[in-house]
């Protein structure tokens, strides 16, 4: 996912343990430039760290660069030891993962994916990012999935817009992210009326993405969030397109009969990431116990 900025959100684990729906006012929201402030206030915090949208990060615990932001186009963050900087400042274990993975963990614990072992969390906004929980664990693999950058069919006669992704042009993010909609239609997604032709095209692209992920990862549910999905009518269009694209091939009642419960919005909204951060923090502490 590529976003225009980075945000570090800190919250007290003690407080949020008491209530999974910690009030926003109990969270300390800091810009990237204010990492110093995180350090200054560090001693007052239990630790959790949510990293979002700076591009690839190193999640391999055995790697010398674990906790680094790696090849981001954002120069100031290139090769930056983010987790280490925070860990050194706080002197506590640090959980480290992508924003979408954290959100997926939050939804698994407290939200729309409870009791599932395999599901996807997608966000469609300034970029398209996806986190996958497979066999009850976050899927990292080689680096971490970048689901927004898969290829989907692009009919240039129907949609001559070349795509917004600086790496691939017309990958899914390049065609269906908020900035792509803005560039194609000259209007922000939230300002396009529900009967605008933009939405059929959008549903078609996203459903192609979903079909590919259903066929490769076989998730038990797909959570779709992000600014573009604030248009509630988009859900029914995506579900219809997805069922049509799969064309009866995946014989699961979740798809054939219960598609409305299969492709769903997240339940934790903007809190999913920070609550998932608590899950990461908890994991970081239990890793410490094992070491
Ligand atoms: Zn791309």
Image (spheres, rainbow, N blue to C red):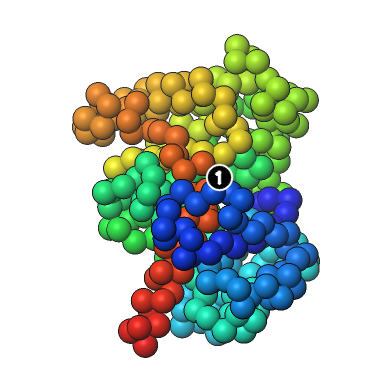
Q: Position of residue 108 (x, y in %)?
A: 36, 51
Q: In this orientation, which residue lies closer to the viewer: 7 or 67?
A: 7
Taking 119 as reference, is 92 above or below it?
below
Some atom of ligand 1 lies within 8 Å of the CB belonging to the residue at label 1: no
Q: In this orientation, which residue lies closer to the viewer: 12 or 287?
A: 12
The secondary element bearing badge 1 is classed as helix
Q: Which residue is mark 1?
A: 270
- Picture quarter containing residue 181? top right
What residue do we see at 61% from left, 36% from top? 227
Taking 58 as reference, is 166 above or below it?
above
Residue 55 visible to an observer of this rendering: no
Q: Is residue 6 left or right of residue 238?
A: right
Q: How many marks?
A: 1
What residue do we see at 46% from left, 26% from top? 235
- Picture quarter containing residue 264? top left
Residue ranking furthest to the top: 195
Q: Position of residue 41 (x, y in %)?
A: 67, 73
Q: Quadrant of the C terminus?
A: bottom left
Residue 122 visible to an observer of this rendering: yes
Mark 1 closeness class: few <14, some 14–19, many ≥20 residues within 10 Å: few
Q: Position of residue 14 (x, y in %)?
A: 46, 65
Q: Is residue 159 left or right of residue 231?
A: right
What residue do we see at 66% from left, 57% from top? 29
What residue do we see at 36% from left, 53% from top? 109
Taking 91 as reference, is 157 above or below it?
above
Q: Position of residue 65 (x, y in %)?
A: 58, 80
């Amino acid at each position: 996912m590529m976003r225009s900025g980075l945000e570090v959100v800190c919250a007290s684990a003690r407080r949020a343990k008491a209530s999974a729906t910690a009030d926003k006012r109990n969270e300390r929201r800091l810009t990237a430039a204010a990492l110093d402030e995180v350090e200054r206030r560090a001693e007052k915090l239990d630790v959790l760290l949510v990293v979002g949208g700076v591009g690839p990060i190193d999640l391999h615990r055995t790697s010398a660069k674990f906790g680094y932001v790696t090849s981001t186009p954002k120069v100031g963050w290139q090769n930056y030891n983010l987790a280490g900087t925070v860990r050194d400042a706080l002197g506590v274990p640090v959980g480290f993962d992508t924003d979408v993975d954290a959100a997926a963990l939050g939804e698994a614990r407290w939200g729309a994916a409870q009791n599932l072992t395999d599901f996807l969390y997608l966000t469609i906004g300034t970029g398209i990012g996806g986190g996958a929980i497979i066999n009850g664990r976050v899927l990292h693999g080689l680096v971490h999935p970048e689901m927004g950058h898969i290829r989907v069919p692009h009919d240039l006669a129907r949609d001559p817009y070349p795509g917004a992704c600086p790496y691939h042009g017309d990958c899914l993010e390049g065609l269906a992210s908020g900035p792509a909609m803005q560039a194609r239609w000259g209007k922000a997604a939230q300002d396009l009326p529900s009967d605008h032709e933009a939405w059929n095209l959008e549903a078609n692209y996203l459903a192609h993405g979903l079909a590919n992920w259903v066929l490769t990862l076989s998730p038990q549910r797909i959570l779709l969030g992000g600014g573009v999905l604030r248009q509630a009518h988009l859900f029914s269009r995506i579900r219809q397109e997805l069922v049509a694209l799969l064309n009866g091939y995946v014989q699961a009642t979740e798809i054939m009969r219960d598609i409305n419960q299969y492709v769903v919005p997240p339940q934790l909204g903007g809190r999913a990431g920070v609550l998932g951060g608590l899950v990461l923090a908890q994991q970081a502490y239990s890793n410490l116990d094992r070491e």
